[in-house]
Image: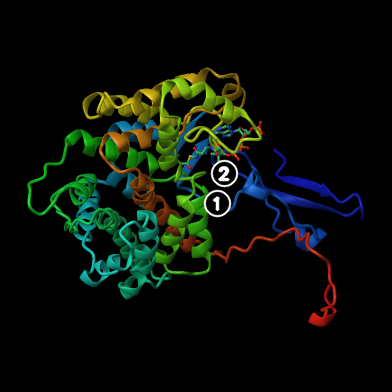
Amino acid sequence: MKDTLTIVDNATGKSIELPIRHGTLGPPAVDIGRLYHDLGYVTYDPGFIATASCRSAITYIDGDIGVLLYRGYPIEQLAEKSNFLEVAHLLLYGDLATQTQLDEFTGVIRRHTMLKESLKSFYSGFYHDAHPMAIMVGVVGSLSAFYHDSTDIHNPQHRDIAAHRLIAKMPTIAAASYKHSIGEPFIYPNNNLSYCGNLLHMMFSVPCEEYHVDPLAEKALDLIFTLHADHEQNASTSTVRLAGSSSANPFACVSSGITALWGPAHGGANEAVLRMLEEIGDVKNISKYLARAKDKKDTFRLMGFGHRVYKNHDPRARIIRQMCHEVLQKLGNTNDPLFELALRLEEAALKDDYFIARKLYPNVDFYSGIIYKALGIPTNMFTVMFAVARTVGWVAQWMEMIAEPDQRIGRPRQVYDGIATRDYVSIEKRT
Ligand code: ACO
């Protein structure tokens, strides 16, 4: 197999042999590191359509056939047999944990759930109607101010402690954002509960009443979190890596990931799905909105449909779809017309030539939003839930990057198409 790609510059007749890098799976990559040095060219690839930004051994996606692997394990097997914290250990450390390793890891994550009391006062600085994602960005970004003992990124132990703290405290921070928005007291974590059980407890219990975690809600949340734990070099993960490449502390990096996740083209899609369903309002309006989604002059898109990488079924959507139906049957208010509308919209889009031709299938967030709604989680918390789960992936990818011996600051080039050099004009001479 030829392991180089020859580029010939027709203008000068110079050529260059660029090495080809092979991963264990996926298309080969042309290493263009010498292109600028030898031929004076940079590459242009807005949206990173054909650009691998790093090497990674964590997650693999084959979007053409709808495959997702965490550390080589198919997502279907993990969804059926594993759970979120075991998957977190797998993503962080590379292998399935032994019982002892898992007990130790779970114990550490359970013990680090509390927030410093003074950190809690940050919340009162936010207006009651602040979006919980805005609160998350601020509170997570502030963590480095509280944990100086875990910000030396060159110390593997510090990296581990920071990773554990981030994963463990995220549900507490998320639940407190919600409690603040509804004016209820913050609920302390109960470390006897599971990761997801604890999150439900901190969101929905009140100090004056007993609260029992619903096992189906806990199971559904654990599945959603497992499916959302990592997704290779998506926008938020790339943001975390780019921020981390400047040696910023992990708390700041994860906070930057939360901001990137927020947009409706990424993690904000689950919230956008529900808002879209509310806007459509009734099954009789489906055809009108499908027509709008297909009209290029209209900015309306079918939220929860399409994916940059999956041009086939999103494997996570297949798994979560089943859970969605189970949750709707057992927990959802079956009279809620929104659920019926979601199912009918899914059916109509899957039969529509526009969506078939462009390989636009429902993605994981089409269903996660519906499950969250059935679990009683408010719409503005949907992306926060995603952020809690994806923290594992962000941290795993950040740790992998920092541990690389030849890690350098990320610094893309550009094609400048502004005005070429001109002279300063004094203000009285400007027209
Ligand atoms: N509704 C209507 N048309 C769509 C949609 C949609 N949701 N998604 C893509 N298309 C059309 C595009 O208009 C384009 O049509 P054309 O070929 O006639 O010009 C074609 O499908 C290809 O779409 P692109 O925009 O080129 O795809 P891209 O990879 O850039 O975008 C994205 C992917 C952002 C996910 C897009 O499909 C989208 O906006 N979907 C809705 C938002 C969403 O659900 N995001 C969640 C993604 S999953 C996640 O982050 C966890």
Q: Quadrant of the N terminus?
A: top right
Q: Is residue 390 left or right of residue 314?
A: left
Label number found at residue 112: none
Dot 1: element = loop
Report the amino acid beneath label 2: Gly
Q: Secondary structure at mark 2?
A: loop
Q: Nearer the viewer, residue 324 or 74?
A: 324
Neighbour tally class for label 2: few under 14, some 14-19, many 20 plus, Cα within 10 Å: few
* Crowd around label 1: few <14 · some 14–19 · many ≥20 (10 Å): few
**Measured from the top left, where is residue 425 in percent x and y?**
83, 79
Query: Looking at the image, which residue is at 11% across and 45% down?
Result: 211
Q: Residue at x 28, y 27 (%)?
A: 328
Q: Mark 2 highlights which residue?
A: 23
Say if disc 1 is inside 8 Å of ligand 1: no
Name the residue located 32 percent from the left edge and 59 percent from the top edge.
166
Going from the N terminus, do you reach mark 2 or mark 1 first? 2
The residue furthest top is 351
To which quarter of the image does residue 149 belong?
A: bottom left
Q: Position of residue 19 (x, y in %)?
A: 70, 50
- Of 340 and 402, nearer the camera is 340
Disc 2 or disc 1, which is closer to the eye?
1
Which part of the image, by quadrant, shows the C terminus? Answer: bottom right
Q: Quadrant of ligand 1?
A: top right
Where 329 falls versus 172 (above or below)?
A: above
Q: Vertically, is 44 above or below 251?
A: above
Please identify the quarter of the rendering in which residue 301 is found. Answer: top right
Residue at 77 percent of width and 63 percent of height: 37
| Residue at image mark 1 | 55
Name which residue type carries label 1.
Arg
Are the residues tagged 2 and 1 within 8 Å (C-beta)? yes
